Image (cartoon, rainbow, N blue to C red):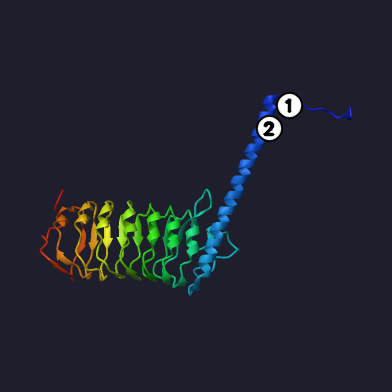
């Protein structure tokens, strides 16, 4: 051993401080790397969404390229802290094509709003991989198929508007698990199987629109649990049976329509002002 080589002795407290700094640096690097990876996931998901759009007549997706950070792309909003996509909103842009299953990789998404376009195909079941989703608006498109059962995994959903599409089948029981839902708009589709009784479990419901669907069946008594209901549209649904008396108890009801059905009974003209 070279006698001229200095020997450094560290106290126990110095050792602790040294390893603490190493640990903090390692964790910070890992978090930074993880954040970059997550950002890359969002970036690639958006590119896959764009790749399944076959027509973009007004150039709504023109900015979706590497000249800008994806958080600055048209229709995209990111959270300030993690730079993850929280809103995807492109409306009335004439988009044609399909909604990519990669939308399910936008795991921080709160709002998905693509109304008044010409999107077709099914609503991808990967929607169920969006646990933070609160607002789903796909109205005025050409979506077909059924409502994906996976939607029950979006437990924070407050608004669903998938009206004016070409959706079929019955209203899936999984919607009954969305306890925070305040607005459900399914009108102008081709749903059958009646208004299911399990919808009464969604006691937060304020607005329900099912008009212009060949549903059939009766209005279930369980809907009497909708104490906060403000809007109820179910005309032209081939409904039968008697008009439930619970409508008299909805003191907040402001808009109400049951016309063009096979319902029997009468409603007081002051409905909506009754109850307390």
- Count every numbered label the image shows and give the total: 2
Going 52% across and 53% down the picture, which residue do you hit? 84
Q: Which of 54 and 2 lies nearest the eye of the viewer?
A: 2
Residue 248 in percent (x, y) is at: 14, 55
Do labels 1 and 2 touch, CB within 8 Å?
A: yes
Count neighbours of disc 1 (C-alpha within 10 A) and say few if under 14, some if 14 to 19, many if 20 or more: few
Q: Is residue 214 above or below residue 179?
A: below
Tell me if I can see residue 255 in this picture: yes
Tell me if I can see residue 141 in this picture: no
Residue 125 in percent (x, y) is at: 43, 62
Snapshot quadrant of residue 199: bottom left
SS label for mark 2: helix
Name the residue beneath numbered marker 2: 18
Residue 150: assigned label: none
Q: Quadrant of the N terminus?
A: top right
Q: If you read the primary sequence from the N terminus, does the residue marked by circle 1 or circle 2 appear first?
A: 1
| 9 left or right, relative to 120 | right
Name the residue beneath numbered marker 1: 10
SS label for mark 1: loop
Snapshot quadrant of residue 127: bottom left
Going 50% across and 70% down the picture, which residue do you hit? 52
Snapshot quadrant of residue 250: bottom left
């Amino acid at each position: 051993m070279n006698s001229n080589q200095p020997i450094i002795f560290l106290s126990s407290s110095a050792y602790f401080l040294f390893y603490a700094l190493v640990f903090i640096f390692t964790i910070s690097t890992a978090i930074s790397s993880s954040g970059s990876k997550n950002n890359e996931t969002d970036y690639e998901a958006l590119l896959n969404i764009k790749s399944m759009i076959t027509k973009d007549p007004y150039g709504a997706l023109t900015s979706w390229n590497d000249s800008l950070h994806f958080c600055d792309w048209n229709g995209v909003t990111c959270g300030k802290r993690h730079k993850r996509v929280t809103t995807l909103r492109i409306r009335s842009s004439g988009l044609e094509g399909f909604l990519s299953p990669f939308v399910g990789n936008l795991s921080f998404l709160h709002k998905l709003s693509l109304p008044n376009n010409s999107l077709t195909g099914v609503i991808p079941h990967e929607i169920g991989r969006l646990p933070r989703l609160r607002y789903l608006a796909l109205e005025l498109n050409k979506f077909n198929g059924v409502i994906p059962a996976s939607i029950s995994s979006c437990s924070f959903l407050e608004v669903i508007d998938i009206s004016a599409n070409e959706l079929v089948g019955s209203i899936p029981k999984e919607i009954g698990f969305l306890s925070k839902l305040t607005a459900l708009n399914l009108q102008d589709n081709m749903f059958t199987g009646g208004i299911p009784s399990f919808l009464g479990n969604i006691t937060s419901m304020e607005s329900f629109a099912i008009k212009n669907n060949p549903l059939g069946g009766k209005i279930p008594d369980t809907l009497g649990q909708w104490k906060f209901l403000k809007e109820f549209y179910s005309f032209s649904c081939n409904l039968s049976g008697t008009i439930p008396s619970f409508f008299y108890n909805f003191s907040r009801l402001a808009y109400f329509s049951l016309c063009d059905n096979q319902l029997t009974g009468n409603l007081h003209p002051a409905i909506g002002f009754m109850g307390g």
